Amino acid sequence: MLPDRVRTLIQLLSRLPGVGEKTAQRYVLFMLTTDSDYGAQMGQELIALRENIGHCSLCGNLAERGGSDEPICSICTDHKRDPHLLCVVARVQDLMAIERTGAMRGRYFVLGKLLSPLEGVHPEELPIERLKDRIASQNITEIILATPPSVDGEATALYLRRELAPMGITMSRIASGVPHGGELEYADPITMGRALAGRQRLSR
């Protein structure tokens, strides 16, 4: 019933998180029937997205390349933030969820993944040495472990706690309030703010 190009785009859009085939079809039909400039602009922006957006060379957050091979995000260049406080998160989505609370006055470090033996993610695949270098070079005095309260998140927090303990820094874990097994990405700002404010110090 539909041209090949339309079906191909529907299949591509349906691979997006939370987008089923029917929703993808509505998106494609909307783009075909709306102002042609809209579709053209979206196409240009999608192409430019991968070309101009990379990961911050310091923390792993999203950042504009700006002609630099080592982009730095706006959070890492914000001089109003506490340079000695570092919040370790699993994903950029978690960083964004914490930022929405307005409760985090320090900076971040994005792991990119969590320990998950079932999915083949082992300790050597985490950027632990880069994290240690960041702590040492920037004189970090407190680490907030803000991994999700899931099995993988707790295992990752325990591993980080063990690896970073010899560095003699204060470590804390975000408090309850984020449901067990839940994703930080979907936590509302009030819940996330309370979790940060009620973080618990971890013994060395």
Image (cartoon, rainbow, N blue to C red):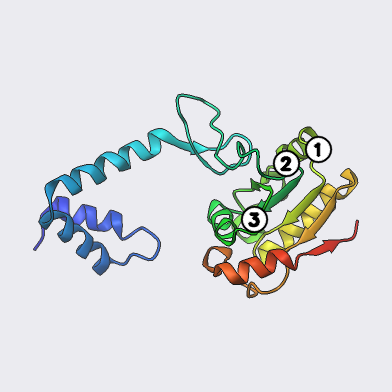
Q: Is any part of residue 162 visible from this angle? A: yes
Callout 3 amino acid: Leu
Tell me: 92 left or right of 131: left
* Mark 1 surroundings within 10 Å by alpha-carbon count, few (fewer than 14), some (14 through 19), many (20 or more): few
Name the secondary structure under disc 3: loop
> Is 55 on the left-hand or right-hand side of 201?
left
| Mark 3 Cα-neighbour bin, 10 Å: few <14, some 14–19, many ≥20 | many
- Where is residue 28 drawn, in percent x and y? 19, 58
Q: Identify the residue at horizontal 39%, vertical 33% (top origin).
A: 51
Answer with mark 3 or mark 1, whichever residue precedes in sequence.
3
Label 1, secondary structure: give it: loop
Q: Are marks 1 and 2 in contact (CB under 8 Å)?
A: yes
**Residue 106: image x %, image y %?**
69, 48
Q: Quadrant of residue 89?
A: bottom right
- Residue at 76% x, 62% y is 173
Question: Label 3, on which residue?
Answer: 114
Q: Which residue is mark 2?
A: 83
Closer to us: mark 3 or mark 1? 1
Among the 4 quarters of the image, the one containing residue 182? bottom right
The disc at residue 139 is 1
Q: What's the CA distance linking mark 1 and mark 2?
A: 8 Å
On screen, residue 86 versus residue 77, left or right, reads right
Q: Looking at the image, is mark 1 or mark 2 earlier in the sequence?
A: 2
Instruction: Please tell me which residue lies in front, 57 or 163.
Output: 57
Q: In this rendering, which labeled residue sits more in front, label 1 or label 2?
A: 2
Q: Residue at x 80, y 50 (%)?
A: 142
Q: Residue 21, percent across and down?
A: 27, 66
Residue in front for this viewpoint, 179 or 141:
141
What x and y, as percent, mark residue 136?
Answer: 80, 36
Contact flag, marks 3 and 1 (Cβ < 8 Å): no
Rendered position, 190 above or below 16: below
